[in-house]
Image (cartoon, grey):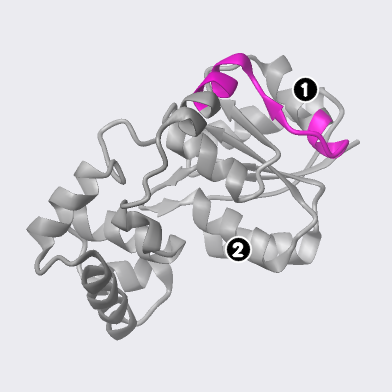
Amino acid sequence: MTHIYLVDDHQIMREGLRALLEAAGHQVVGESADLTEALADLLRMRPQVLLLDLNLGGRSGFELLAQMQRRRLPTRCIVLTMSEQPRHVAEALRLGASAYVLKGSSGSDLINAINEAVQGKRHLGAKAANLALQAFMQPAAEHDPMRVLSPRERQIIVMVVNGQSSAQIGLALHLSPKTVATYRSRLMAKLGVADVPALVRLAIHHKLIDSNDE
């Protein structure tokens, strides 16, 4: 029996996953739609496996992956997402994910990913493996200014270009508006942009945001 924690911002998705996993003999020890709560639970519970969505209502699952890597948590992470962006597969693997599973995959593929993750193996379905290959075959973006940004700065860019104020971002990320404003000024300086419209154009150009991000 594998102890599993779920992070997804759709309750119906978590309920469906719980039913699938428990029917397969695994135990869901916790779940959350909030990354701050999820990190606290992971530190306390130390589950064997985490199932993690990437799009969490304005926040990114990559933030949690980065925190897990920084803290060297032993929990194996399986990214379970709708995103078919090659760069997302590459980033997830770079941050230590054990598997990348698309939400259109079969239940048996997810169970296989869990079993392999527990054994210390990596798992990519055929489609995810092809996406990873695409990402690693693309020319290195040596001059991509986005490479200089931290996961938190990337997260704040997405929220800024979606029209959220410093106060709204601060509330969502548990930061003071002043801290958010500092992040915003710093990342705009790093990117060499002077205003939000220029930031939006740059983010779209470098595909940090697009209509297919899930």
Residue holding disc 2: 67
Identify which amino acid the numbered label 1 is placed on: Asn
- The span from disc 1 to disc 2 (Cα, nearest Å) is 25 Å
Side of 157 relative to 201 (left or right): right
- Compared to residue 3, the image places residue 13 above or below, namely above
| Residue 144 visible here | yes
| Front position in the image: 158 or 18 | 158
Residue shown at 18%/51% (left/top)?
202
**Residue 62 percent location from the top left of the image:** 51, 51
Q: As drawn, is 173 to the left or to the right of 92? A: left
The quadrant of the rendering that contains the N terminus is: top right
Residue tagged 1:
112
Residue 106 in the figure: left or right of residue 190: right
Instruction: Label 2: state its secondary structure.
Output: helix
Numbered circles on residues, count: 2
- Decide: is 187 above or below 30: below
Q: Quadrant of residue 167?
A: bottom left
Asked if the magenta segment contains residue 83, the reply would be no
Foreground: 117 or 107?
117
Q: How packed is label 1: few (under 14 Cα within 10 Å), some, or many (20 or more)?
A: few
Q: Which residues are magenta?
A: 116-131
For the residue marked with disc 2, what is the amino acid?
Gln
**Which x, y percent locates residue 214?**
39, 35
Q: Is residue 26 above or below residue 160?
A: above
Which residue is at 82% across, 23% downward?
24
Element on which disc 1 rests: helix
Judge whether 186 appears above or below 64 on screen: below
First in sequence: mark 1 vs mark 2: 2
What residue do we see at 10% from left, 57% from top? Answer: 198
Based on the picture, tell me whether residue 118 belongs to the magenta stretch. Answer: yes
